[in-house]
Image: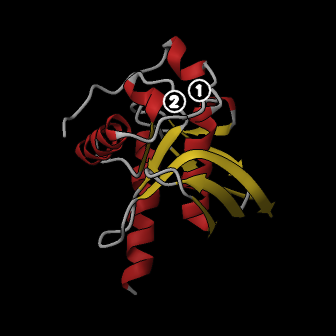
Amino acid sequence: MAIREIVKHPNEVLETPCKTVTEFDRQLAVLLDDMHETMIEADGVGIAAPQIGVSLRVAIVDFQEGQEPIEMINPELALFEGKETDIEGCLSFPGIFGEVERHGRIKIKAQERDGSWYELEAEGYEARAILHEMDHLDGVLFTSKIEKYVTQEELDELIRQQEEEDSL
């Protein structure tokens, strides 16, 4: 496994729809392992292959310690419901945060590293993270969906308030 360099905006690979994965081999497994290690090192909750310069429909979401990461190869959105607005950031846009509206509940169909298909239902933050990474695979950047930008100071204050509420 290796930590790869994260591609920062502007870069054409971030705005180009990715190719479908057709080879489920050792090279794909290495890519997935490298992506996960890179994401962890960068303190992210998700990463898509174009963010490390690889134009393939591969993404990972991993934000709950103790759970296996969600590896998505050739993901497709099968069902979506509701709308929720929350703050997002992106490893390819360091220091930029904004309010983005996304579906609150989703169902996806995707492939495992061995090529087998699975379905996954998600809601809330997990759904948001999955949709953010799936957008990367279509060359769609979260900045194109931001309704209101949020400064680092505003984000820090919101986090502090949330931590206070959680401790009550």
Q: Is residue 94 visible?
A: yes
- The spot of residue 61 in percent (x, y) is 45, 54
- The spot of residue 55 in percent (x, y) is 50, 24
Q: Is 32 in front, or is 62?
A: 32
In this rendering, is residue 112 above or below 48? below
Q: Is 144 in front, or is 30?
A: 30
Spatial distance from mark 1 to mark 2, Cα to Cα?
5 Å
Q: Is residue 93 visible?
A: no
In this rendering, is residue 29 above or below 103? above
At label 2, counting other C-alpha atoms closer than 10 Å, the crowd grade (few under 14, some 14-19, many 20 or more) is some
Rendered residue at 70%/62% (across/down) = 106
| Mark 1: amino acid | Cys
| Mark 2: amino acid | Leu
Q: Is 129 in front, or is 71?
A: 71
Asked where in the image residue 122 lies, by quadrant, the reply is bottom right
Mark 1 vs mark 2: which is more N-terminal?
1
Q: Is 64 in front, or is 144?
A: 64
Asked where in the image residue 136 lies, by quadrant, the reply is top right
- The spot of residue 29 in percent (x, y) is 33, 43
Label at residue 18: 1
Tags 1 and 2 in contact by the CB under 8 Å rule?
A: yes
- The spot of residue 67 in percent (x, y) is 36, 71
List the residue tagged with mark 2. Answer: 56
At label 1, counting other C-alpha atoms closer than 10 Å, the crowd grade (few under 14, some 14-19, many 20 or more) is many
Q: Position of 111 compared to 95: left or right?
A: right
